[in-house]
Amino acid sequence: MPNDSNADKKDDHNCEERLNELKKFVSAGVWEGVSLIDWEDWHWQLRNRIATIDQLENLIKLSPEEQADVLLAEKRLALGITPYFFNLIDKHDLSCPIRRQVIPRIEETQSMPWERDDPCGEESSSPVPGIVHRYPDRVLFLVTDRCASYCRYCTRSRMVSNATGYDFHPEFERQVAYIREHKEVRDVLLSGGDPLLLNDDKIDEILKRLRQIPHIEMLRIGTRIPIFLPQRITAELCDILKKYHPLFISIHTNHPRELTVESRKALGRLADAGIPLGNQSVLLKGVNDDVVVMKALVQKLLMCRVKPYYLYQCDLVSGSEHLRTSIKKGIEIMIGLRGFTTGYAIPQYVIDAPNGGGKIPINPNYIVSQNDERIILRNYEGKLYEYPEPICLNVVK
Ligand SMILES: *Cc1c(COP(=O)(O)O)cnc(C)c1O
Ligand code: SF4
């Protein structure tokens, strides 16, 4: 039938187009000989992760500062980069913002007196291993210590990747029992490590068990998988996730270049599964401490149907001084966003306070003066406006 053959032709054409697109991508990187089927297979991406100095040096010319540290990284936070994410590095640019996030540098060995292995004091709010209960109605639920790639500034580098021998073993039954007993907990945030690195059955099981607890209203997953390993966001995974609504996902992106065609597709699949998506960024020196970069990032996130949620001031984690930028800069970025772009694009800037203080919002000051009668405000353009307080009218008796 003519219709069928037309459809076939169209399919062939789409298929060919897709193959060409994929071919282009793979040959753009260093994995030129790799079959497209392998490249798109998340297990292949994980098996072929760059995890040793030899692998790294075969692929990129390291600076002396990087070379000196890659070996030492094994004792602090393992080296790990998926081939997919590695291909986003500009090999000729030593200050490439992607490179700075995943390739260790010698500065990581320098610890400042104010730095801690557990900068947010999570261990002191942990009633059972793998649960952090700091806020009244919600808990962090850690399910693994592995990630697809490792961020050099990771706030949980004391346990993530197990390079320090922390030996994290989540005690799932004890974690679930804790939540069962604590009826005030209505929101569970799965984190780690990266929960979406677990296999489908395990994810299904964890979400199912949590959903069986009557007082749990919402579930959340914190993950960098759509950025490090978008191949992992399969139709099958989305089918599992959407059984457990309301389920929210927070991704972690720091630079607009991370939002590739692949990531955008993965995020589209999650959004199509009805999952509200938010993004958490960490303010990092030489990566995104720039209002132009940040504006591009938040606008691109909205195009991927992701709402910028938090912008974190970098935690005081050991060996992170070279990646920290000033709070003044952070506020300047926030001033450069508000009013100048879509309100939906604007994240809340926070400091996760040392010693377990939790997240504290940091806002530019738009209040010029205030008394009982009026407030004087500054708008995004710097113009002043007056707004009167309500007066107490005398009601006639
Ligand atoms: C960030 C965090 C949460 C979640 O906080 P929200 O502001 O609700 O996103 C919960 N528990 C801990 C320990 C956290 O660090
Ligand atoms: S993905 Fe998250 S948990 Fe994993 S290394 Fe990066 S910041 Fe740490």
Image: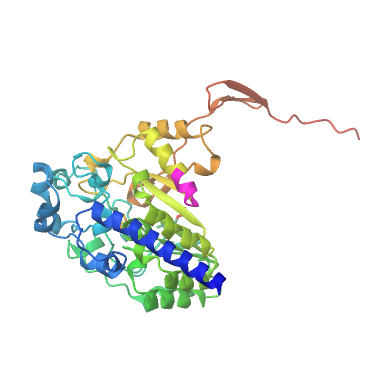
Q: Could you say which quadrant of the image residue 223 lies in?
A: bottom left
Q: Nearer the viewer, residue 40 or 137?
A: 40
Q: Nearer the viewer, residue 36 or 351?
A: 36
Q: Is residue 140 visible?
A: no
Q: From the viewer's perspective, tell me whether residue 54 is left or right of residue 140.
A: left
x and y percentages locating residue 372 in the rendered image? 65, 27
Q: Quadrant of the N terminus?
A: bottom right
User: Quarter for ligand 1?
Assistant: bottom left
Where does the magenta region start and end? 300-306
Q: Give the answer, above or below, for where 273 lies relative to 58.
A: below
**Residue at horizontal 55%, vertical 67%?**
217
x and y percentages locating residue 390 in the rendered image? 72, 31
Q: Verify whether residue 128 appears in magenta.
A: no
Q: Give the answer, above or below, for where 59 lies relative to 346.
A: below
**Residue at horizontal 34%, vertical 74%?**
199
x and y percentages locating residue 294 in the rendered image? 40, 38
Q: From the viewer's perspective, tell me whether residue 26 is left or right of residue 9.
A: left
x and y percentages locating residue 371 in the rendered image? 61, 25
Q: Is residue 351 visible?
A: yes
Q: From the viewer's perspective, tell me whether residue 203 is left or right of residue 214.
A: left
